[in-house]
């Protein structure tokens, strides 16, 4: 029988098997001490150079197996640390979703209503402006993301070039790479993408107001802002509530715009709940956790929409 030229190499196999079967911190530490002694024996053997490389690789395998073993028993708090990171990223994604929701309510709804009021005055070229305003809704979200990605680009982006043309070099920023500006930049793109939809919805509601109402308001002396806030807006209040509900539900479904622009970065600062669910389920293969996040998205949207509908009914009463 041939003698094994490197006994330390063979001992690694037995040590790995013992590590797999021994449980508890005390046994794991003893096994790791044994692995260290065997490693020193194997690394110092000069019989076969190829065995030394395999010994190094086996130490890496043993280290990974040990981490998995320790993680299953909660050793060194690695599992708790992982949970804390997940909890922090989940809370950050919830906060970013709230920012997107507020952006839609404060930015898209008022801007869409303002554009609808201007187009309802029958200005020249209103049909052209209505088509241009609705264009971002028609084109795909991927194209919208690519357009704003070129606008925000640090090297050749239109925004930084315009600032440089006006001598505002100090205002040039890394709009998508700076954690302080990334959510603001995405919010601007999000407003531009969807405000045309609300403009068309509100314009259709304004055009359904009977002419007799406007004529009676003019006879009573209600003109300008007074007629807009006292008569026009209250008459399309139900349409406004529909727009609010749709804006809230749409904010919890936003995915492709942020995924293409930043991918949730930098450092998860633009990660919303849908991206957090996608990364957990399909990138990290944690389908159970991803499913729980998706259910959380549904619950959040249902709670917020229910509160908005209840407030709307109370004001109608």
Image (tube, rainbow, N blue to C red):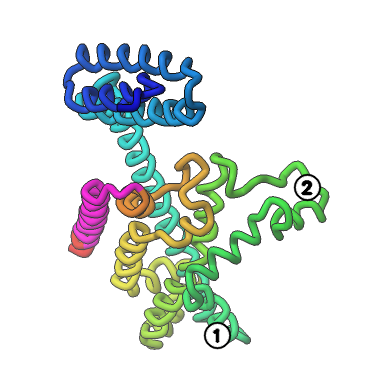
- Left or right? Give the position of 46 relative to 161: left
Q: Nearer the viewer, residue 64 or 231?
A: 64
* Crowdedness near tag 1: few (<14), some (14–19) or many (≥20) residues, C-alpha within 10 Å: few
* Crowdedness near tag 2: few (<14), some (14–19) or many (≥20) residues, C-alpha within 10 Å: few
**Does 290 lie within the magenta span?**
yes
Residue 120 visible in the displayed image: yes
Residue 274, image quadrant: bottom left
Which label lies toward us, 2 or 1? 2
Which quadrant does the C terminus fall into? bottom left
| Spot occupied by residue 286 in the image (x, y as percentages of width and height) | 27, 47
| Spot occupied by residue 239 in the image (x, y as percentages of width and height) | 32, 73
For label 2, the residue is 168
Residue 234 visible in the displayed image: no
Q: Which mark is residue 184?
A: none
Residue shown at the point (35%, 68%) measured from the top left: 243
Residue 251, image quadrant: bottom left
Which quadrant does the N terminus fall into? top left
- Left or right? Give the position of 144 relative to 290: right
Q: Earlier in the sequence, mark 2 or mark 1?
A: 1
Q: Of helix, strand and loop, which one carries label 1?
A: loop
Above or below for 180 versus 106: above
Q: Which mark is residue 122?
A: 1
Q: Of helix, strand and loop, which one carries label 2?
A: loop
Q: Is there a contact, CB below 8 Å, between mark 2 and mark 1?
A: no
Residue shown at the point (44%, 54%) measured from the top left: 103
Residues drawn in magenta: 284-312
| Spot occupied by residue 207 in the image (x, y as percentages of width and height) | 41, 84
Q: Nearer the viewer, residue 243 or 33?
A: 33
**Does 181 lie within the magenta span?**
no
Q: Main secondary structure of the magenta part?
A: helix
């Amino acid at each position: 029988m041939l003698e094994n030229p490197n006994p330390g190499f063979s001992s690694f196999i037995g040590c790995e098997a013992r590590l797999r079967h021994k449980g508890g911190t005390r046994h794991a530490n003893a096994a790791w001490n044994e692995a260290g002694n065997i490693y020193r024996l194997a690394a110092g053997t000069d019989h076969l150079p190829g065995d030394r490389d395999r010994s190094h690789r086996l130490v890496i395998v043993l280290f990974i197996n040990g981490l998995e073993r320790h993680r299953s028993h909660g050793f060194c708090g690695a599992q708790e640390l992982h949970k804390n990171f997940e909890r922090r990223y989940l809370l950050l994604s919830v906060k970013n979703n709230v920012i997107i929701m507020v952006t839609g309510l404060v930015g898209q709804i008022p801007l869409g209503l303002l554009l609808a009021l201007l187009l309802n005055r029958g200005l020249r070229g209103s049909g052209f402006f209505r088509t241009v305003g609705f264009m971002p809704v028609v084109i795909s979200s991927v194209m919208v993301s690519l357009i704003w990605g070129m606008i925000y680009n640090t090297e050749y982006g239109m925004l930084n070039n315009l600032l440089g043309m006006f001598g505002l070099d100090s205002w040039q920023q890394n709009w998508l790479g700076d954690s302080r500006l990334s959510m603001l930049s995405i919010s601007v793109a999000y407003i531009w993408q969807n405000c045309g939809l609300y403009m068309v919805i509100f314009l259709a509601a304004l055009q359904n107001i009977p002419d007799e109402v406007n004529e009676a308001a003019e006879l009573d002396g209600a003109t300008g802002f007074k007629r807009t806030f006292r008569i026009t807006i209250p008459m399309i209040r139900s349409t406004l509530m529909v727009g609010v509900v749709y804006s809230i539900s749409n904010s919890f479904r936003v995915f492709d715009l942020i995924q293409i622009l930043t991918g949730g970065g930098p450092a998860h600062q633009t990660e919303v709940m849908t991206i957090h669910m996608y990364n957990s389920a399909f990138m990290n293969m944690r389908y159970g956790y991803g499913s729980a996040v998706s259910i959380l998205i549904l619950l959040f949207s249902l709670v917020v929409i229910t509160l908005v509908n209840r407030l709307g009914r109370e004001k109608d009463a």
